[in-house]
Amino acid sequence: MATTIQISGNIKTTLDKMKLFERETYNDIIERMIEDDLELNERTKKDIEEARKQVKAGKVVSHGEVEKRIGLR
């Protein structure tokens, strides 16, 4: 069953930019976004939250430091 929804011009522009090919429908784009969101299972969400905590705690290494450690600098 099809339905009509209202979206702002900005959202329409964003959806247009997200098209993988010219004739892709807005429905296809929205389905793809929903699938992407659902792929974030509980384990992934926990891992992301743990990573955020580590960043806030300062437990990070810069790209430059990684390069030094592996001998690229």
Image (spheres, grey):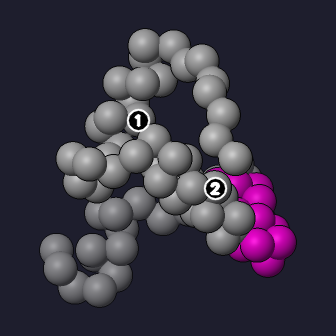
Do labels 2 and 1 touch, CB within 8 Å? no
Q: Residue at x 22, y 85 (%)?
A: 71
Three-letter code, disc 2: Ile
Q: Is residue 70 left or right of residue 73?
A: right
Camera-side residue: 58 or 3? 3
Q: Is residue 70 visible?
A: yes
Q: Residue at x 23, y 54 (%)?
A: 21
Q: Dot 2, crowdedness within 10 Å: few (<14), some or many (≥20)?
A: few
Residue extent of the magenta highlight: 41-55
Measured along the vertical axis of the image, is residue 13 above or below residue 38?
above
Give the quarter of the image for residue 64: bottom left
Q: Is residue 12 left or right of residue 41?
A: left
Measured along the vertical axis of the image, is residue 3 above or below residue 25?
above
Q: Secondary structure at mark 1?
A: helix
Q: Dot 1, crowdedness within 10 Å: few (<14), some or many (≥20)?
A: some
* Mark 2 or mark 1: whose residue is earlier in sequence: 1
Camera-side residue: 43 or 37? 37
Query: Would residue 71 be counted in the magenta stretch?
Result: no
Q: Position of residue 69 (x, y in %)?
A: 34, 81
Q: Secondary structure at mark 2?
A: helix
- Check residue 15 in the rendering and tell me which mark sits there, or answer none: 1
- Check residue 34 in the rendering and tell me which mark sits there, or answer none: 2
Cα distance in 3D space between marks 2 and 1? 13 Å
